[in-house]
Image (tube, rainbow, N blue to C red):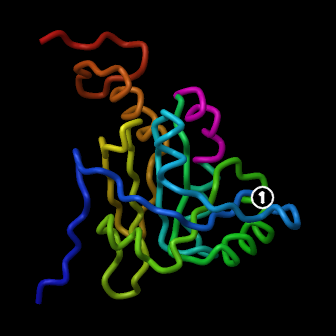
Amino acid sequence: MNNMNKTLSLGAQFPDFTKKAVVSIEKGKEFYDLNSEEIRNSGKWMVMFWWPKDFTFVCPTEIAEFNKAYTDFEDRDTILIGASTDSEFVHAAWRRDHEDLRDLRFPMLADTSKSLATELGILEQNEKVAYRATFIVDPQGTIRWVSLYDLNVGRNVKEVLRVLDALQTDELCPCNWTKGEATLTA
């Protein structure tokens, strides 16, 4: 039985999408139609990180951590987007309900049809929820980094920033390299 995911990887084009996203908890301003064309036209990098389910335990710790680092992504000309297969209404309810999520500064994308998660190859087979996946996409829409975590393990936002920094140097960066350190010459 071959129902394994074929996750999009380095060098692939990030799929086109138009999805509802939650951008506010202010009445009447909650939702926005987010699309890949708008992101590509911005000329910026994109980091899209996925979590399995709203209203769970590991997920809000990650989302809050990404939110704390929001200006770090902004400083790097990078659009930050969070995503799950929950609906925009579930996202909005969770944001209103959870203290750490009320002031999010990035959109929460609702992949209710699971079409984007399926195209990315990150849909968990049994529950049909997204794995904890993170994609770094360059301004041309090319996937430059992918990480996938088991459903039970939270990721490290500092590592996402470190890799983004390294990719943005467009140089050779040695093991454990951090921004400001010397890069390698071939």
Which secondary structure dominates the residues rendered in magenta?
A: helix
59 to 45, vertically: above or below: below
For disc 1, the marked residue is 24
- Give coordinates of residue 36: x percent, y percent: 48, 53
Q: Which residues are magenta?
A: 66-76
Amino acid type for the residue under numbered disc 1 = Ser
- Residue 70 located within the stretch drawn in magenta: yes
**Residue found 34% across the figure and 88% down from its top:** 126
**Residue found 41% across the figure and 27% down from its top:** 165
Q: Nearer the viewer, residue 56 or 6?
A: 6
Q: Is residue 174 left or right of residue 97?
A: left
Instruction: Answer with the quarter of the image where residue 16 lies.
Output: bottom left
Q: Quadrant of the C terminus?
A: top left
Q: Nearer the viewer, residue 181 or 7?
A: 7
Instruction: Answer with the quarter of the image where residue 100 lies.
Output: bottom right
Disc 1 element: loop
157 to 44, vertically: above or below: below
Q: Residue furthest right?
A: 27
Q: Quadrant of the N terminus?
A: bottom left
- Give coordinates of residue 117: x percent, y percent: 39, 70
Q: Nearer the viewer, residue 8 or 96?
A: 8
**Residue found 61% across the figure and 67% down from its top:** 20
Q: Is residue 63 left or right of residue 27?
A: left
36 to 171, vertically: above or below: below
- Give coordinates of residue 136: x percent, y percent: 39, 44
Q: Is residue 29 left or right of residue 31?
A: right
Instruction: Answer with the quarter of the image where residue 151 lies.
Output: bottom left
- Residue 166 located within the stretch drawn in magenta: no
Q: Callout 1 environment at 10 Å: few (<14), some (14 to 19), or many (20+)?
A: many
- Give coordinates of residue 12: x percent, y percent: 24, 50
**Residue found 79% across the figure and 71% down from its top:** 97
